[in-house]
Image (spheres, helix red, strand yellow):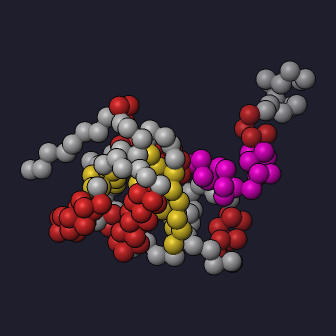
């Protein structure tokens, strides 16, 4: 049995730990229906690739039409290339879930990707299965993206008014 490493987010140096995840924008859970229709009508990419440094909270976003291992690998390489081009020399640890786009259950893919990333000063670390909180920063950023990027502002205001303010007919209403 392979023992999992624990990475302490609180003592991590900038860009030392980078949480990585894929968001299916069309997941039908978080957004109003008109947003899904808009994305489909204009043939916008349905996948958002996210990498977030747990220390600086700097995020990298890319979009794609396919959820694939090849796109996942390209995403790692793009983030590494950008960081190295901007003189970031830290050893990079990408924490990932068990999605096939990030090597999944394939021990061979994990080994091959680690060999590929090692000369670039990077590696991947798979979180424990069924433990999304181990990628908590990037998971929370997905919710923020829904609220700040994908839901039109007037919809957010309407939702806030409905949920946070009592109506005149309510027993709790100050006017009532």
Nearest the eye: 160 or 48: 48
Nearest the eye: 165 or 155: 155
Q: Which residues are magenta?
A: 143-159
In the image, residue 151 lies in the stretch drawn in magenta? yes
Q: Position of residue 151 (x, y in %)?
A: 69, 55
Is the residue 161 above or below the residue 26 in the image? above
Q: Quadrant of residue 13?
A: top left
Secondary structure predominantly adopted by residues drawn in magenta? helix
Q: Position of residue 24 (x, y in %)?
A: 50, 64
- Relative horizontal placement of residue 7, taking residue 154 as reference (left or right): left
Query: Which residue is found at the position 68% from the left and 64% from the top?
Result: 35
Query: Which residue is found at the position 67% from the left and 50% from the top?
Result: 148
Nearest the eye: 59 or 6: 59
Query: Which residue is found at the position 51% from the left and 56% from the top?
Result: 60
On the question of residue 121 being in view, the answer is: yes
On the question of residue 129 being in view, the answer is: no
> For the image shown, how many numbered marks are present on the structure?
0
């Amino acid at each position: 049995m392979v023992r999992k490493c624990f990475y302490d987010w609180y003592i991590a140096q900038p860009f030392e730990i980078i949480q990585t995840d894929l968001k299916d924008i069309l997941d039908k859970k978080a957004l109003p229906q008109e947003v899904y229709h808009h994305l489909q009508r204009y043939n916008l990419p349905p996948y958002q690739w996210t990498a977030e440094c747990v220390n600086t909270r700097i995020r990298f976003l890319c979009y794609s039409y396919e959820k694939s291992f090849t796109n996942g690998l390209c995403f790692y390489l793009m983030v590494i290339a950008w960081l190295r081009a901007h003189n970031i020399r830290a050893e990079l640890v990408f924490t990932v879930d068990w999605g096939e786009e990030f090597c999944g259950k394939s021990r061979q893919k994990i080994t091959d990707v680690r060999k590929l990333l090692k000369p670039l000063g990077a590696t991947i670390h798979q979180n424990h299965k069924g433990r999304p909180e181990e990628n908590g920063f990037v998971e929370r950023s997905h919710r923020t993206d829904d609220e700040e990027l994908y839901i039109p502002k007037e919809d957010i205001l309407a939702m806030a008014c409905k949920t946070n303010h009592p109506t005149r007919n309510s027993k709790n209403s100050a006017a009532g």
